[in-house]
Amino acid sequence: MHIRTHLAMKPVSLALLFALFTLSTKLALTSDVYDVDGKPVVNGGSYYAIYNEPGGGPVTLAKVGNETLPISVVLGSFYGNSNKRSVKFHVRGSQISYYVPTNFALDIEFSHTPDGVQSSQWTVGKKDLLVRIDNEEQGILPGIFKIKKNSGTGYVYRIVFCPHGEACFPVGAERVDSGEAQLVVTDGEAIPFVFSRAEGDSATLAI
């Protein structure tokens, strides 16, 4: 009886070891995302996603082309940046996470939705791969966003988009006719971002 009990428990122990190994491997590939003050970015908190180049400002919304509402996600300017908008990162899935980890599936949205628009969540156009909060005309490309750490020191990151069932691609910027630098999913260079906590934000855990 003792031997049978021991043998019966052995597969459970192996399964537990495998689960622990998988978890430890997954954790080794991730780390918390940090803001410019060296503090972990809170899941559901409001942050400015700032283009990490001289003169770069937070991403914001603009009317591009024939758009009648500000639905295109563009790079803001550090100068005269009265139109800056904060964003929120929401970790996808059943796992409850207080902080935003790298390499995890995310939804990204602006903290406030403009008048006349139903949602402030970032989407990618199926036809042109441009990032907007309303891609009804283009059709929405299903997928997820992730934040990845840039190489080197400092709290600099890049955002990638992963279409369902495909590899991840960098989120870069494309100069459009109006002169705005609109975010776009590309096979070129990713935009380097740093994140700064929005003024007056008192985020709690997003579940």
Image (spheres, grey):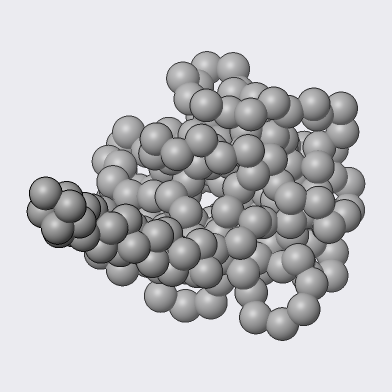
Q: Nearer the viewer, residue 53 or 91?
A: 91
Q: Position of residue 83 (x, y in %)?
A: 77, 37
Q: Nearer the viewer, residue 195 or 57?
A: 195
User: For residue 37, what is the image quadrant?
Assistant: bottom right
Q: Residue at x 57, y 46 (%)?
A: 73
Is residue 131 depicted above or below 21 in this figure?
above
User: For residue 147, what is the image quadrant?
Assistant: bottom right
- Residue that extends furthest to the front in the rendered view of this protein: 1
Q: Is residue 29 left or right of residue 136?
A: right
Q: Residue at x 69, y 26 (%)?
A: 204
Q: Residue at x 46, y 64 (%)?
A: 24
Q: Is residue 55 left or right of residue 27?
A: right
Q: Nearer the viewer, residue 46 or 103?
A: 103
Is residue 154 depicted above or below 39 in this figure?
below
Q: Is residue 166 left or right of residue 70?
A: left
Q: Is residue 6 visible?
A: yes
Q: Position of residue 29 (x, y in %)?
A: 50, 69
In this rendering, the count of numbered labels is 0
Q: Nearer the viewer, residue 61 or 157?
A: 157
Q: Is residue 127 visible?
A: no
Q: Position of residue 115 (x, y in %)?
A: 59, 17
Q: Is residue 102 left or right of residue 55?
A: left
Is residue 129 depicted above or below 120 in this figure?
below
Q: Position of residue 8 (x, y in %)?
A: 14, 52
